[in-house]
């Protein structure tokens, strides 16, 4: 049997199809024919595209630069991690509310006479809701937990903040509370902290609204005692606390944009123009642009030395007793009736809200700082690690500084021990180490550059002021290394 030619099939195809399937029904397309599905549009925009490091990863990074202070590192790492999880959750909840309000069904007016509900399907792609289908309950909005860091000077408060700023891919600004005053007085307003945050975000208000603000020396805005005349305003203390209240909790702060200052009208340069006459073709000065930053998603980290706060803690804990065998109050034991507990070495670990209120802060201000941590004073082993082991240690800094002049300097282990002991007795933490090093290396930094000196050795006698530093000229490197090796051998024998 021979099949007909293709042309005959083409001519009778339509009639054959009609007999087999009946009349066709034309369908309408509600979407464009070339509809390319873009999966990237299903995910709404969030300012936090990159993933934040876990608290353990943050602590491991901080350990490379900051010695000790394990509790403070945990608190700050967890606070930063939870803060940005909270930001993501709140953004997702907000977008879910917008999705539900947009896709709310129209009211049913079919019961009214002459009114029929129009069943129209929107020509818009359905946005995938961020909430899980298994959970029909609406997620609550998470409140942020600002952090207050207590610790003596030189314990690493500012270094912790700066190190976090390096590892986090978020805007981070550092401000000093000593220059803050109440609005309308000479000094900086508290809004300058948000303006520095916008500058750190490269003038991007969306990134700035999810950044971190670090305010140092917060103890300097404590309420002053009434030492002056009655009725005087504390514009640098309680006034600043009142100004920070709404900013800590979450408010919209208006900051000036980059280069938004008023433009002065230039003087007339045409010599034919008479004085006092209006200069033509000069536009009026434009109004400065402003940014409105919502601080609801901004994490605030406040820190200060709080000198004298430990005395308030001791007074609260030292509860006296009566009787012949009563325990008298003493500064050496804290707290007193804790026979079954380990005695804490840092009184700031026992700080409560009432102690901070007694120190000079208003209760509303402290209530907005739910997370409080303290830094312990540095011990001698901690000072040794700062001097020799951490990244950017002082010994490596001074070694590189002498190396620029072609001079090699070495410190014996006994000399490093003596430097740490002096710094511990002197106080000041890591800043005390630098002061001792500057005084110790003053003569070598003055004598060695530009001379024939090529090697410098610092011993324990040099630190104690018994003998000057030992110098060697060029070509005496072998003698220099032999002397240093003998000192190290004696040090190891004395340690055993």
Image (tube, helix red, strand yellow):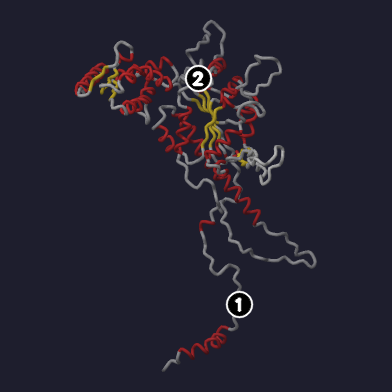
Query: Would you call the spot at circle 2 few (<14 residues within 10 Å), some (14-19), or many (20 or more)?
Result: some
Q: Nearer the viewer, residue 208 or 148?
A: 208
Provide residue 12's location: percent of width, then percent of height: 52, 89
Provide residue 194's location: percent of width, then percent of height: 58, 36
Left or right of residue 69: residue 443: left
Residue at disc 1, secondary structure: loop
How far is the residue under mark 1 from the one under mark 2?
83 Å
Q: Quadrant of the C terminus?
A: top left
Q: In the displayed structure, would residue 1 be above or below residue 148? A: below
- Quadrant in the picture for residue 58: top left
Q: In the displayed structure, would residue 324 be above or below residue 395? A: above
- Quadrant in the picture for residue 62: top left
Q: Identify the mark at residue 26; answer none if there is no mark.
A: 1
Provide residue 287's location: percent of width, then percent of height: 66, 42
Q: In the displayed structure, would residue 404 be above or below residue 273? A: above
Q: Quadrant of the N terminus?
A: bottom left
Residue carrying label 2: 347
Q: Extreme right residue here? A: 113
- Residue beneath the point at 57% across and 31% down: 370
Q: Is residue 363 visible?
A: no
């Amino acid at each position: 049997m021979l099949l007909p030619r293709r042309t005959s099939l083409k001519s009778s195809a339509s009639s054959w199809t009609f007999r087999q399937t009946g009349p066709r029904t034309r369908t309408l397309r509600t979407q464009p024919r070339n509809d390319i599905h873009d999966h990237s549009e299903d995910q709404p925009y969030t300012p936090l595209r990159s993933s934040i490091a876990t608290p353990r990863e943050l602590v491991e990074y901080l350990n490379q630069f900051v010695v000790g202070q394990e509790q403070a590192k945990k608190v700050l790492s967890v606070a930063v991690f939870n803060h940005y999880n909270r930001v993501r959750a709140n953004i997702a909840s907000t977008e879910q509310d917008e999705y539900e309000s947009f896709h709310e069904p129209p009211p049913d007016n079919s019961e009214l006479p002459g009114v029929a509900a129009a069943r129209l399907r929107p020509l818009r792609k359905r946005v995938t809701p961020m909430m899980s289908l298994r959970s029909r309950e609406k997620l609550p909005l998470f409140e942020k937990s600002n952090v207050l860091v207590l610790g003596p000077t030189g314990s690493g408060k500012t270094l912790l903040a700066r190190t976090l700023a390096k590892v986090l891919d978020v805007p981070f600004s550092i401000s000093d509370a000593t220059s803050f005053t109440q609005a309308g007085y000479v000094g900086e307003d508290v809004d300058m902290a948000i303006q520095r945050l916008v500058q750190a975000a490269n003038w991007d208000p969306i990134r700035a609204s999810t950044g971190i603000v670090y305010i140092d020396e917060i103890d300097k805005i404590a309420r002053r005692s009434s030492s002056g005349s009655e009725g005087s305003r504390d514009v640098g203390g309680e006034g600043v606390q009142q100004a920070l209240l709404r900013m800590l909790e979450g408010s919209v702060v208006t900051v000036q944009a980059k280069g938004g200052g008023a433009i002065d009208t230039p003087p007339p340069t045409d010599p034919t123009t008479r004085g006092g006459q209006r200069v033509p073709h000069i536009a009026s000065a434009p109004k400065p642009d402003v940014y409105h930053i919502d601080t609801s998603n901004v994490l605030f980290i406040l820190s200060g030395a709080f000198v004298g706060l430990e005395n308030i803690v001791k007074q609260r804990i030292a509860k006296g007793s009566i009787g012949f065998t009563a325990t008298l109050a003493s500064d050496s034991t804290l707290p007193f009736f804790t026979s079954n507990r380990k005695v804490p070495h840092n009184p700031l670990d026992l700080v409560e809200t009432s102690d901070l209120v007694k120190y000079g802060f208003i209760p509303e201000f402290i209530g907005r700082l739910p997370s409080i941590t303290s830094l312990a004073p540095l011990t001698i082993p901690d000072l040794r690690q700062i001097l020799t082991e951490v990244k950017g240690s002082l010994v490596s800094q001074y070694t590189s500084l002498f190396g620029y002049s072609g001079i090699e300097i070495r410190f014996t282990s006994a000399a490093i021990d003596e430097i740490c002991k002096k710094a511990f007795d002197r106080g000041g933490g890591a800043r005390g180490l630098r002061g001792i090093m500057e005084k110790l290396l003053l003569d070598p930094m003055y004598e060695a550059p530009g001379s024939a000196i090529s090697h410098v050795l610092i011993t324990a006698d040099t630190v104690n002021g018994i003998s000057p530093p030992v110098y060697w000229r060029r070509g005496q490197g072998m003698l220099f290394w032999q002397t240093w090796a003998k000192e190290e051998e004696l040090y190891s024998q004395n340690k055993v």
